[in-house]
């Protein structure tokens, strides 16, 4: 069985994974981490509960740390879009845990709460920004944020984005990203609209599909 040490992740990341108590990578982690470290695009058909957050977060942190520099004000190097504030906050927490031995700063912005502290966070500078689509567009429109330095773009729970009517916002955001980037799309299901979005967004992607875990099925 392959363990995390076989995945060629940087030592500070392996230490954080061990701090979390993870011993064995989940199937989606085993299948996603090597191609993501190599810079490939990825289509992940997977639900929450499969370990998909670490599947994208660990290689993302590795690649950012590999060519480390101080975060630039208002110009994140990675953007993660999530449909709800709960999910956005959870992803940011995970990134902070997995990056605890690195100097990678993660910020999170979502609607329904004061925009001021979020503006301050962006001014201060973050490497990774986790966001819900509406608040992200507000911040861009108010000139508190630019997406022209984004190297990696991750769209999480694309099918829920669709259900919640966020696809037009997501498309607006995608239009502002640099053409040269790594892109990941995750979705539990693949309705036509999501497949169309994936086709237009991803370049020669690796496709990783994992069955829901027992706990996910029970939920
Ligand atoms: P996710 O699908 O990303 O929401 O992850 C589901 C849960 O599994 C989270 O509580 C993670 O902390 C946990 N988890 C992720 N990867 C592993 C792993 N390799 N070993 C044990 N637990 C994990």
Image (cartoon, helix red, strand yellow):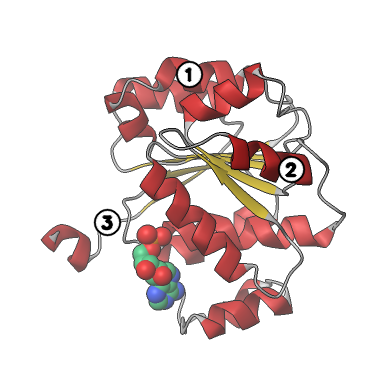
Query: Disc 1 marks which residue?
Result: 169
Q: Residue at x 76, y 46 (%)?
A: 125
Of labels 1 and 2, earlier in sequence is 2
**Tags 3 and 2 touching, CB below 8 Å:** no
Q: Residue 4 at x, y = what percent? A: 56, 78
Q: Residue 178 at x, y = what percent? A: 74, 26
Give me the disc on residue 77: 2
Q: Residue at x 70, y 57 (%)?
A: 105
Quick check: is the Cβ at mark 1 less than 8 Å away from ligand 1? no
Query: Dot 3 lies on which element?
Result: loop
Q: Residue at x 65, y 55 (%)?
A: 60
Q: Is residue 79 above or below residue 89?
A: above
Query: Disc 3 marks which residue?
Result: 211
Of labels 1 and 3, earlier in sequence is 1
Query: Camera-side residue: 7 or 83?
Result: 83
On the rendered image, what quadrant is the C terminus found in? bottom left
Of labels 3 and 2, earlier in sequence is 2
**Tags 1 and 3 touching, CB below 8 Å:** no
Q: Residue 137 at x, y = what percent? A: 56, 22
Relative side of 200 to 175, left or right: left
Query: Camera-side residue: 126 or 199?
Result: 126
Q: Residue 157 at x, y = what percent? A: 38, 40
Closer to viewer: mark 3 or mark 2: 2
- Would residue 92 be seen by someone viewing this image from the given angle? yes
Quarter where residue 52 is shown: bottom left
């Amino acid at each position: 069985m392959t363990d995390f040490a076989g995945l060629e992740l940087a030592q500070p990341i392996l230490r954080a994974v061990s701090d979390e108590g993870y011993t064995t990578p989940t199937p989606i982690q085993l299948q996603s981490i090597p191609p993501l470290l190599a810079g490939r695009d990825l289509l992940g058909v997977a639900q929450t509960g499969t370990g998909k957050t670490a599947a994208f977060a660990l290689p993302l942190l590795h690649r950012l740390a590999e060519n480390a520099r101080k975060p630039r004000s208002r110009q994140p190097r990675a953007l993660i879009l999530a449909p709800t504030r709960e999910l956005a906050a959870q992803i940011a927490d995970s990134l902070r845990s997995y990056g605890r031995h690195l100097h990678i700063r993660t910020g999170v912005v979502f609607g329904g709460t004061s925009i001021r502290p979020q503006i301050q966070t962006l001014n201060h500078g973050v490497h990774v920004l986790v966001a819900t689509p509406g608040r992200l567009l507000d911040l861009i429109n108010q000139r508190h944020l630019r997406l022209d330095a984004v190297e990696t773009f991750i769209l999480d729970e694309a099918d829920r984005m669709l259900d919640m009517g966020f696809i037009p916002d997501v498309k607006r955001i995608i239009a502002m990203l640099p053409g040269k980037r790594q892109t990941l799309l995750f979705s539990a299901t693949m309705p036509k609209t999501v497949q169309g979005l994936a086709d237009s967004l991803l370049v020669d992607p690796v496709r990783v599909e994992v069955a829901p875990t027992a706990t996910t099925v029970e939920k």
